[in-house]
């Protein structure tokens, strides 16, 4: 019972027997001696018998026996439900099971017929490839009565007569006219016309005594998701990726936690938290996302900027190390964030020099407010051939950062990759610096690098010694 179900390892909502048993402990109908934890079949057996009757025996081995009880509401599903989860947390499987419950009038999701259903995704391809045909989609669910897909009419049809129509957030007006008993909205946090599409859908949810809505998404601080979170009529469910570890590749969770743990990005993408930008911050997360792209094949100039810490103790600041390059189009591209905490002088110098060599950079910029000439000396002790240009801050951090933030607004800076810790600092950098009084060392290094490329006195062409 602890094995992954056929709903797909990446999105199967089911938990192993141990996990589900823990959730179910103490439920009416459980069996076993004192201190024992019953498997989920027995903890839900009474409910299955009372609600499914003779059908209860037909669900052996199916998702109902393994789903965490928080995701399988035995007292009935909410009318408006928002499930926000991390990557691989099982939110797609939950949405598919909910939709099938609507179509088949199966408790606890539905106690009445929901014959007309809307399936809404970011694109039509997403609806087909994820919500319908994906490893956790409607066609992958266990049991009989699989619907048939009519491509010419963009709809799913069940033997019960229920029909699910397919819609895309790219075309909100396609929701004008149709009407529904229920709707499943998937990954609403990345819809292209989120608010407009959702509003059009609300006008169509007008059939039956209690129209139902299910929204499954990775949380993103976009207007639609913030609106749903603030809506008291919407029941919220948070689904961390770790809760579905039994159905994921063994190394997946450890790898993503190593890469993104303890960052705002990790809290969003792994823990399923809605992380909003700090009010008054110089950068906004959605604009950084819009500025993400590929690294150009050719760069006219590359710099590595270093903001060294004053010390290397437990409570010392991090060492900011950020690389950026200037493209032929005059756009600065952030290439790397090699910053790290509790950095000893020899260690940060070695890392900065290593990045300089790896990128074949032209210049290594080093702020000397904290260390003076010692900064140049430490770098030279690692590699005396590296050209070092020292810079000294004569203005406050925010005053230096504001012109760089303006360049982002103008589309003159792009990120060639994802830099979670750096981007967290950017979106938390307010009038008084970072929240909690921390030093924005990564942002400082970024500001120096972009300033050198776009706001310096001259554009120096690349000259390499061969």
Image (cartoon, rainbow, N blue to C red):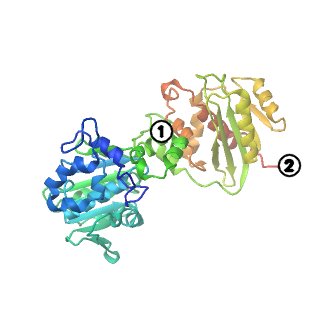
Q: In the rendered structure, find residue 68 and report the number of the disc placed on it.
A: none
Q: Is residue 192 above or below residue 319?
A: below
**Residue 357 sits in which quadrant?**
top right
Q: Is residue 151 above or below residue 48?
A: below
Q: Specify whether 94 is left or right of 406.
A: left
- Seen from the viewer's position, the closer of residues 213 and 300 is 213
Q: Residue at x 29, y 44 (%)?
A: 236
- Where residue 103 sits: x, y (%)? 22, 64
- Decide if residue 220 is in sight here: no
Q: Secondary structure at mark 2?
A: loop
Whichever of callouts 1 and 2 sits on the residue coming sooner in the sequence is 1
Establish if 119 lies above or below 229. Answer: below
Where's residue 261, x and y in %? 51, 39
Q: Is residue 343 left or right of residue 40?
A: right
Disc 1: CA contacts within 10 A as few (<14), some (14-19) or many (>=20): many
Q: Residue at x 32, y 48 (%)?
A: 83
Give the image location of residue 268, x and y in percent.
44, 43
Residue at the front extreme of this rendering: 33
> Looking at this view, is 126 or 289 the one in front?
126
Q: Under tag 1, what secondary structure?
A: helix
Query: Measuring 43% from the left and 47% from the top, which residue is drawn there?
Result: 245
Q: Residue furthest bottom?
A: 152
Q: Measuring from the top left, give residue 399's x and y in whole percent.
A: 58, 30
Q: Quadrant of residue 177?
A: bottom left
- Which of the labelled discs sits on residue 264, or is there none? 1
Residue sitting nearer the eye, 421 or 204: 421
| Residue at the spot 80% in from the left edge and 38% down from the top edge | 387
Q: Which residue is mark 2?
A: 465
Where residue 168 sits, quadrant-wise, is: bottom left
Judged by depth in the image, the label closer to the viewer, 1 or 2, is 1
Q: Residue furthest right?
A: 466
């Amino acid at each position: 019972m602890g094995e992954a179900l056929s709903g797909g390892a990446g999105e199967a909502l089911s938990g192993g027997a141990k996990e589900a048993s823990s959730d179910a402990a103490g439920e009416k109908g459980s069996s076993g001696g004192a201190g024992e934890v019953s498997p989920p079949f027995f903890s839900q057996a009474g409910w299955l018998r009372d609600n499914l009757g003779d059908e209860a025996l037909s669900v052996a081995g199916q998702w109902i026996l393994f789903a965490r009880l928080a995701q399988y509401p035995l007292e009935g599903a909410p009318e408006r439900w928002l499930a926000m989860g991390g990557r691989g947390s099982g939110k797609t499987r939950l949405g598919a099971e909910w939709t099938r419950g609507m179509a088949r009038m199966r408790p606890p999701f539905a106690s009445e017929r929901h014959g007309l259903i809307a399936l809404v995704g970011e694109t039509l391809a997403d609806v087909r490839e994820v919500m319908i045909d994906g490893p956790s989609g409607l066609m992958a669910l266990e049991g009989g009565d699989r619907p048939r897909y009519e491509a010419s009419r963009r709809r799913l049809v069940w033997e019960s007569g229920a029909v699910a129509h397919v819609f895309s957030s790219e075309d909100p007006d396609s929701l004008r006219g149709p009407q529904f008993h229920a709707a499943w909205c998937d990954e609403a946090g990345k819809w292209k016309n989120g608010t407009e599409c959702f509003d059009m859908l609300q006008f169509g949810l007008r059939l039956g005594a209690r129209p139902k809505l299910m929204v499954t998404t990775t949380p993103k601080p976009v207007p639609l998701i913030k609106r749903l979170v603030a809506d008291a009529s919407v029941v919220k469910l948070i689904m961390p990726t770790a809760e579905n570890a039994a159905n994921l590749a063994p190394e997946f969770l450890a790898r993503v936690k190593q890469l993104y743990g303890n960052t705002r990005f990790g809290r969003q993408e792994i823990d399923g938290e809605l992380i909003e930008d700090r009010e008054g911050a110089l950068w906004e997360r959605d604009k950084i996302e819009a500025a993400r792209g590929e690294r150009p094949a050719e760069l006219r100039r590359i710099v590595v900027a270093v903001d060294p810490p004053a010390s290397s103790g437990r409570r010392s600041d991090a060492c900011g190390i950020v690389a950026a390059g200037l493209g032929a189009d005059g756009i600065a591209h952030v290439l790397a964030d090699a910053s790290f905490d509790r950095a000893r002088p020899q260690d940060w110098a070695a890392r900065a020099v290593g990045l300089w060599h790896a990128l074949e950079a032209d210049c290594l910029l080093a702020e000397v407010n904290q260390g003076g000439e010692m900064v140049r000396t430490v770098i030279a002790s690692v590699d005396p051939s590296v050209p070092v240009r020292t810079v000294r801050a004569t203005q406050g951090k925010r005053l230096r950062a504001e012109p760089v933030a303006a360049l982002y607004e103008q589309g003159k800076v792009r990120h060639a990759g994802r830099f979670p810790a750096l981007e967290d600092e950017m979106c938390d950098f307010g009038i008084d610096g970072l929240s909690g009084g921390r030093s924005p060392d990564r942002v400082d290094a970024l500001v120096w690098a972009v300033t050198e490329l776009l706001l310096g006195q001259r554009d120096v062409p690349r000259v390499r010694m061969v």
